[in-house]
Image: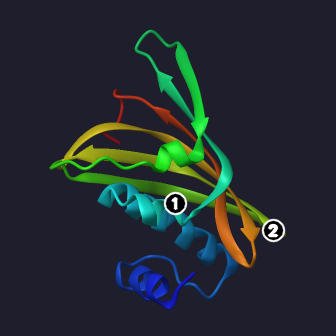
Amino acid sequence: MTTLMIVAALMLGGPDSSTEESRVLVTVDALLGAVSRRDEAAGMAQLRPTGTATVLFEKPDGTVDARSVALKTFAEATAGPEKYDERMLDRIVRIEGAMAMVWGRYAFAIDGKQVHCGTEHFDLVKDAGHWKIQNITWSVRTAGCED
């Protein structure tokens, strides 16, 4: 983690980097910020190259369509005029040695309009002294996002 990332996180009201839990959250927040900015390089810097991403699309009839891809596919960014905003809410962090997880609700908006929400889960490992994301799993629903 660079000093610039720590300073940026503190300036934006992000976690204090003085605890291991905070260092885990800085990694997750850096990825979410990269998604919001459509910054592929910044997103890839938070990921381990062997990771996976799984999305669970919750359909109105109650069924779920699960899809998994390489984590690097998740980080691929496309240019566009729309402004993305992904926020993670009510985060829970657990750490055991070089393994961590972050779980919480999220909301995703495009141009200020919420388009979907759900729950996301990040698996992280400490790699050469830095927390890196190994796996991400999240649900996508378009109803019930108001709360």
Residue type, mark 2 in image:
Ala
Q: Which mark is residue 60?
A: none
Classify residue 95 by image quadrant: bottom right
Location of residue 16 in the rendering, given as x and y in whole percent from the top left corner? 53, 84
Residue type, mark 1 in image:
Met
**Could you say which is closer to the camera, residue 91 or residue 35?**
35
Classify residue 144 by image quadrant: top left
Q: Secondary structure at mark 1?
A: helix
Query: On the rendered structure, is 147 left or right of 131?
Result: left
Location of residue 139 in the rendering, given as x and y in whole percent from the top left corner? 51, 34
Location of residue 69 in the rendering, given as x and y in whole percent from the top left corner? 58, 35
User: Which of marks 2 and 1 precedes in the sequence?
Assistant: 1
Q: Which mark is residue 44?
A: 1
Q: Which mark is residue 98?
A: 2
106 to 13, vertically: above or below = above
Q: Residue at x 49, y 85 (%)?
A: 6
Q: Residue at x 67, y 48 (%)?
A: 51
The reply to whether callout 1 and callout 2 are in contact (CB within 8 Å) is: no
Real-space CA distance between mark 1 and mark 2, rounded to the nearest whole angstrom: 20 Å
Query: On the rendered structure, is 12 left or right of 46?
Result: left
